[in-house]
Amino acid sequence: MFQSIADVKQRLEKANYLASDDIATVVFLADRLGKPLLVEGPAGVGKTELAKAVADALNAELIRLQCYEGLDEAKALYEWQYAKQMLYTQVLRDRVGELLADTQTLREAFERIAEEEDLFFSERFLLPRPLLRALMAEERPVLLIDEVDKADPEFEAFLLEVLSDFQVSIPELGTIRARTQPFVLLTSNQARELSDALKRRCLHLFIDYPSFREELGVVRMRVPEASEALAAELVAFVQEVRNLALKKVPGLSETLDWARALALLNVHSLGVKEVEQTLGVIIKHEGDQMRTRQSIPELLRRAQLRLREWKE
Amino acid sequence: MDDVLVGFIRVLRAAGIRVSTSEALDAMQTGRLTGLRDRRLLKAALRAAIVKRQQDIPLFDELFDRYFDPNVEELPVSPQMAQQGAQDAHPSKPHEQFMQALREALERLRLPQLDHLTEALLAGNVMVITAEMLQHMSPEQLQQLESLLQRGRLTRYILDQMGWQRIQQQIGELARELQAAGEFELAQQVRERLWELQELFPRWVAEQVNDAYERMSPATQQQPLSRDLERKAFSRFTEEEVRAMQEIVDELARKLREDFARRMRRGGIRRLDVSRTLRASYQTAGVPMELVFKEHRRNKLRLVVLCDVSSSVRNASRFMLQLVYSLQQQRGHVRSFVFIADVDEVTDVFERHSVDAAVEMAMGEANIRYWAHSDFGSVFRQFLDEYSDALNSRTTVIVLGDGRSNYFAPQLDALAEIRRRSRQVIWLNPESQYSWGIGDSIIDLYARECDMLTECRNLEQLRQVMEHLTRSVA
């Protein structure tokens, strides 16, 4: 549990995540109200990072369920370990023989085995997948359901059931109820609109591209090897790039990669040449690259202006 | 505290933001956790609990600021108070100081706290007052209003329900008590404020009733869609009518998607995947415990929509764009382009803006020459050059246009190439079939390279096209 909003901020920062006031407030609320938190926003603004940082800050296990098209209950909840069951039967064959030695008829033997059936469908042979693992955890875990918009609407409906009651039923075992209610984070890139029902169940946080100040803060924290001057220059540049009409706008993660790359190349100040050589790190779409390449000098000039404004 | 939030939620709903009961309850809980004092915190918290659509965020922010900061918008201030305020350090907040002084005096003299509405009235917090008023103004009541006389009656009813009489007495009482306690100046201010309110408030309520009535009047009310509209040609729709169709378009898009999903599920016979079943059986000592079936190739609806936005087919395009917008919201894999003589992608625009704004931008702000004459040939050529990554063997390309190419070169080979690289090309022509091939229409020529060419000038035809689309792809 977080103590206060300030506490959230502090502990997330310790986990290497700079949270804005809005983010800290919402995380605090989700923690206190025990509601799932749906985080939406463009790719690469640190949605998944937030989940990792929250797990870190709460000192909790992070259980991650990556969604994709065709993900179904079996892959998200549990599977039976047939191999292990078989192995056990093989090893125990003699014992089974003994057990059945004094039975007279087939029917009797059958009955005897049936009495032991529970053994074979017990938690011992159950392979829990992320959702079930989160429910069965002894200590409160952080459950990250990543890119929920990629899953099919049917799966969303199933998720809804789990998230509202925090329990699932397994036909052979009965109902399993969460031992501790996990801290649930869902992320979405808005590839499609999620259902209203799911949205209603969750608190909602929209993370947009960071402001200059925020982004600079993150770069300084995550990539200390880049000098402050360089960091400011490259962040200003990326901020300008985001104003272009690109197909794939560079996110915070691209900025960080770029900062690392430039620091590695011992760049101290951005010029046209440096940018051209490393542009591929922040811009990954071919058409975008061509468009950006043409306007590098202009972008640099505007980035300088932005820097000057900021310094004043 | 709760009634402050309930009032706010009422304002949000009146402004068109959907707030469900469970979300309202969440809002209460978050409000209790954060308290009302720190506005920024409260704003972030309520936003998380209530606003679930990105497009609603700006509206929410604006309403929040107006509701919780009484200085943004005010019932008129008396000239005297305004003057006093002007001489002080914070000229823009005359009420703030008056209210501050009043609250301090109440505390000092151990007088009872003012109730929520009374305080809002004294402070001139319009949003809080509006929230309270909306509670007593139901749509049913407004619908029954016919004459001016009845509007007057509703005004009086609302004033009664809000306890206007009692509030006046309370303020009068307050002034007397302040007077008795020797707070002459403050008492005078309160009295003046009361006179002012008596003058203004009933009139303000009457205006609100009038406004609401105007909004509800039959002229602006949505009529249920009749059979005629189903067959009415898009070109005869007014712009408002097209916009009002959004709901129907949404439904059409949803239906298309659901039909599609259902067809995919039905799928027919499942084929056993022998090799994978055998591989799985190694785990179980060669006993095939688990049968693995061949997966149906998950055919998804992948659309590329090319929409002519020249003035001759404007309405049909607007319609198509709305449909594309809904499709895109519900499922990705739709890429939208607009063209006249050159072509630009608007997929992103659709992702970032509300439907009205997005359609408006596609119709007027994309990176194409809007004043040019339609030139289908160059459009297809340019599309191939720049956006061929949008095409693969599973995409359905939909072209919406009248095929009137102003005698420019048809470049049929470009369309042929598009068709070769995609699953199918469907051409929707919003022009009446009778005029095809007449004048500069080369639609017959293009028809050779389309898998389907159909007249699409009304809702009914559009529905048919969508059904065909589901069948042909699934």
Image (cartoon, coloured by chain):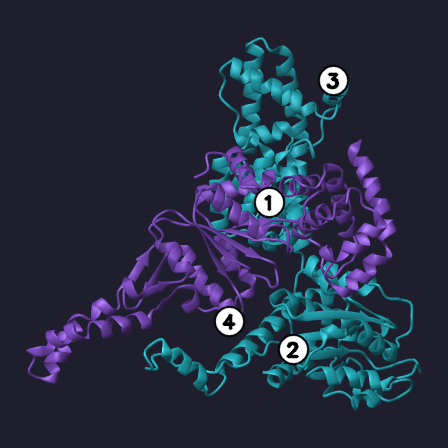
Chain colours: A purple, B cyan
Residue B298 is situated, as x and y percent measured from the top left of the image, at 55, 78
Residue B280 vs B54, above or below: the answer is below
The answer to whether residue A309 shows anywhere in this view is yes
The answer to whether residue B273 shows anywhere in this view is no
Calculate the distance from the C-alpha at mark 3 to the C-alpha at mark 4.
Answer: 67 Å
* Residue drawn at point x = 54 percent, y = 20 percent: B173
The type of residue carrying mark 3 is Asp
Calculate the distance from the C-alpha at mark 1 to the C-alpha at mark 2.
Answer: 36 Å
The foreground one among A103 and B303 is A103
The reply to whether discs 2 and 4 touch (Cβ–Cβ < 8 Å) is no
* Residue drawn at point x = 78 percent, y = 52 percent: A241
Calculate the distance from the C-alpha at mark 1 to the C-alpha at mark 3.
Answer: 33 Å
Instruction: Indicate which disc residue A70 carries.
Output: 4
Chain letter of mark 1 equals B
* Residue drawn at point x = 60 percent, y = 31 percent: B120
Which of the two discs, 2 and 3, sits closer to the camera?
A: 3
Q: For residue A248, which quarter of the picture?
A: bottom right
Q: Secondary structure at mark 4?
A: loop
Q: Which residue is mark 2?
A: B227
Calculate the distance from the C-alpha at mark 2 to the C-alpha at mark 4.
Answer: 40 Å
Q: Secondary structure at mark 3?
A: loop
The type of residue carrying mark 4 is Gly
Which of the two discs, 4 and 1, sits closer to the camera?
A: 4
Residue B260 is situated, as x and y percent measured from the top left of the image, at 57, 78
Q: Which of pointers 1 and 3 lies earlier in the amino acid sequence? A: 1
Q: Are marks 2 and 4 on the same chain?
A: no
Instruction: Indicate which disc residue B11 carries.
Output: 1
The reply to whether discs 2 and 3 touch (Cβ–Cβ < 8 Å) is no
Q: Secondary structure at mark 2?
A: helix
Chain letter of mark 4 equals A
